[in-house]
């Protein structure tokens, strides 16, 4: 039996992600300063308040910083297309044993769709895998009202946990991911995305024949 190498989709490092980490570092530093300020007079009411605020901020923002750095440095895939099916890895720092896998045989349809207004800046493209009704994955239908509207008329059950946002920073382009999905499954596919830039066709003019002198 021949196996096909999996297609792993990751998120490229970006200024936005680095900016988030920098913002958390600033908040963490402020919390440390609050805590140090409270140590100067721990017996006073103000000192106790500073200690509590500082300690709470250190614990909270420290945990957030660990998660943000894990996303930036860990490079865990967001989506994997493999022989067993569609895999959505658990978010770091959760163990990979928490990965979700939807077998290809349990996919009734696939739909690419858009959320938002075409003329607005909040337009986001999505990729939904619709499990067959007999699949155990078809039981998790909570919160999928919009997905139900967007995939109306397609076979399968709209499940929010099997809907993936196709981000601009993907290491594999969305159209390449869709092509790989269609290669791996015979399930029907519909592209309902809106607001995509139209591909420009280059029309080359034929050279005119030289005029007789």
Image (spheres, grey):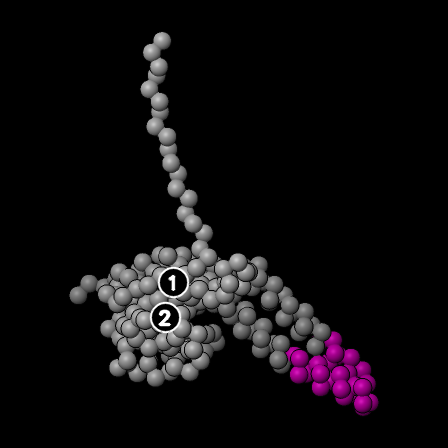
Position of residue 110 measured from the top left corner of the image (x, y, whole percent): 32, 67
Q: Residue at x 51, y 70 (%)?
A: 70
| Label 1 element class | strand
Q: Which residue is mark 1?
A: 192
Q: Which residue is mark 2?
A: 151
The answer to whether 66 appears left or right of 102 in the picture is: right
Q: Residue at x 49, y 60 (%)?
A: 118
Which corner quadrant of the image does residue 5 belong to?
A: bottom left
- Which residues are drawn in magenta? 32-58
Q: Residues within 10 Å of mark 1 (few under 14, many from 20)?
A: some
Quarter of the figure that contains the C terminus: top left
**Viewer-proximal residue, 83 or 202?**
202
Position of residue 4 measured from the top left corner of the image (x, y, whole percent): 26, 62
**Separation of disc 2 and disc 1 at Cα?**
9 Å
Q: Residue at x 34, y 16 (%)?
A: 210
Q: Residue at x 36, y 76 (%)?
A: 158
């Amino acid at each position: 039996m021949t196996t096909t190498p999996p297609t792993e989709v990751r998120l490229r490092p970006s200024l936005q992600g680095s900016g988030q980490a920098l913002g958390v570092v600033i908040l963490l530093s402020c919390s440390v300063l609050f805590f140090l300020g409270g140590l100067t007079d721990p017996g006073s009411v103000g000192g106790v308040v500073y200690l509590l605020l500082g300690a709470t901020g250190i614990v909270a923002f420290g945990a957030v910083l660990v998660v943000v750095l894990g996303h930036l440095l860990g490079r865990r895939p967001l989506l994997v297309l493999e022989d067993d099916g569609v895999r959505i890895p658990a978010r770091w720092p959760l163990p990979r044993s928490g990965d979700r896998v939807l077998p290809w045989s349990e996919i009734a349809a696939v739909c690419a769709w858009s959320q938002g207004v075409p003329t607005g800046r909040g337009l986001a493209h999505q990729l939904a895998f619709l499990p067959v009704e007999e699949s155990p994955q078809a039981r998790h239908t909570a919160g999928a009202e919009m997905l139900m509207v967007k995939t109306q008329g397609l076979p399968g059950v709209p499940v929010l946990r099997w809907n993936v946002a196709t981000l601009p920073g993907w290491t594999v382009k969305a159209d390449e991911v869709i092509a790989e999905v269609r290669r791996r499954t015979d399930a029907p596919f519909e592209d309902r995305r809106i607001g995509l830039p139209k591909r420009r066709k280059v029309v080359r003019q034929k050279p005119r024949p030289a005029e007789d002198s």
